[in-house]
Amino acid sequence: MIRLPSREDSGSSPATDAARQQCIRPACGATYELKSVHQRCEKCGALLDVAYDWERLPVPARLALFDERRASSRNPLDYSGVWRFRELIPFAELDKVLTIGEGQTQLRRTDGVAAYVGLDPGRLFLQYEGLNPSGSFKDNGMTGAFTHANMVGAKYAACASTGNTSASLALFAGVSGLLKAVVFVGSGKIAYGKLSQALDYGATTLQIAGDFDDAMRQVQEVCLQTNLYLMNSLNPFRLEGQKAIMYRVLEGLGWEPPDWIVVPGGNLGNSSAFGKAFAELRQLGLIPRIPRVAIINSTGADTLDRLVNRAGLRWNGGNVGDAAIEAFYAQMDAEKRKAHTIASAIEINRPVNLDKALRTLEVTNGVVRAVPDAAILDAKAMVGAHGFGCEPASAASVAGARLLREQGVIARDERVVCILTGHLLKDPHATVGYHSYDAERLREEFGQFGVAQARHANRPIPVPDDIEAILSIIKDL
Ligand SMILES: *Cc1c(COP(=O)(O)O)cnc(C)c1O
Ligand SMILES: [Zn+2]
């Protein structure tokens, strides 16, 4: 763990009575002390936010004032791509911050992928979160949740995970020594890159005989019955950290908001955090307008797409229509419909942050789409071929942007940022299979996901151990 310098070097902690936890439903609005632990609102069961009295907090007058802290500082708080924006995440007691240098990520302009998506040159940017210490954006949130866990003195923490949350939790627990980590994963689903991290970083790893949705249900119950601190994105302090992804996107664009943010949707924590980030920035007068957020499901795990685009669900001032949601899940159970997609990080049918994602759609005039796995893997190969690689779920953002272009929802001269949520090496099986399987093996292993063809496969070429044979192949390059 990076130990922090003295408080004087880091700036003073905000008055913690200017921050609290608050029920997201305006009709309830119950509040809870900052340094207390709740999974949900104790009064009505809704999700909780971290809420601030901004007028009592020192907020910079312009976002450009953050520029001078970028990347060069020896102060660990400034080195972090999350905590250098600490005035916008002002719940933390600065001597309790746990940082491992998360968020040192990049926004890259990529004209090759822009052409694939159908955008003009200079209009598409990839926010590459695979550069985080554990290889996914989850580290942005984990530093927030660990900081709160440190503030309340938690000794044990748990999460359910499709893989990346467990990798991040295990890494933060291992490097800080602050607490012991227990991770719940579904059986047989988790990508090897991610499982290897949880095991190697020393987390107690429970493989539940079920899928992610089962593991998520169990971990919530276990945390209620024990003193395990819940590290899933249900935890509002995770989402506070993930707001910083949007601050970095704005920073990468010289503080000029793009027209679109496109993000894969799984448990919907990221999209929820993005909406809160933009709502707060506008409230503080720090941005002139809010980008539209497009949330992209896989068609094999498309609860949000169905609820928004078929059932017409909306935030509706916090009256989201619980009865309609319950009926939807009852039908899903009756049909024994399970999430099923090669994009394992978004293989989730009961997204815990559903309500907050609906709020994001409202605040940002957002849209939801679902894309098939074949389109996800094709888009993934195009991302790889033009620069940074990513894991399948991440490429849903690029496949989604392409679909929205085809539908004319995004115009070709609009500025679009796709979030690449996780590193290529998280799921080598998906990548090697896509590029190297013949038609029969592709059908056997990926056919269950509806992938019949690998349009952008870069096949390995078998060649004899013979110089003439090798030369005869490479001469045609
Ligand atoms: C967790 C994760 C997602 C889904 O994010 P949510 O916040 O759960 O919607 C997408 N891609 C990757 C790589 C992830 O690890
Ligand atoms: Zn409530």
Image: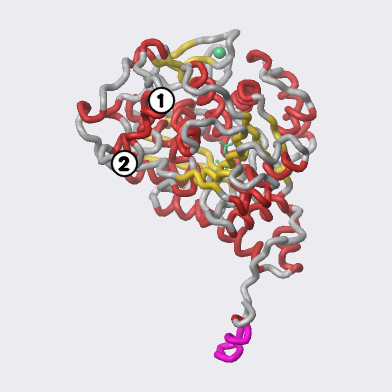
Q: Which residue is mark 2?
A: 176
The amino acid type found where label 2 is placed reads Ser
Does residue 37 lie above or below 188 as drawn? above
Q: Nearer the viewer, residue 80 or 183?
A: 80
The reply, left or right, for residue 14 in relation to residue 419 is left
Which secondary structure type mostly characterizes the magenta part of the structure?
helix
Instruction: Give the residues drawn in magenta, as a range.
Output: 463-473
Residue at 61%, 39% (x, y): give it: 416
Q: Earlier in the sequence, mark 1 or mark 2?
A: 1
Residue at 60%, 8% (x, y): give it: 27
Tell me residue 185's x, y (percent): 54, 45
| Residue 153 visible in the shown view | yes
Q: Are marks 1 and 2 in contact (CB under 8 Å)?
A: no
Q: CA distance from mark 1 to mark 2?
A: 21 Å
Tell me residue 130's x, y (percent): 49, 48
Residue 470 highlighted magenta (yes or no):
yes
Q: Which residue is mark 1?
A: 89
Residue 360: image quadrant is top right
Residue 328: image quadrant is top right
The amino acid type found where label 1 is placed reads Ile
In the current view of this chain or complex, which residue is farthest to the top? 27
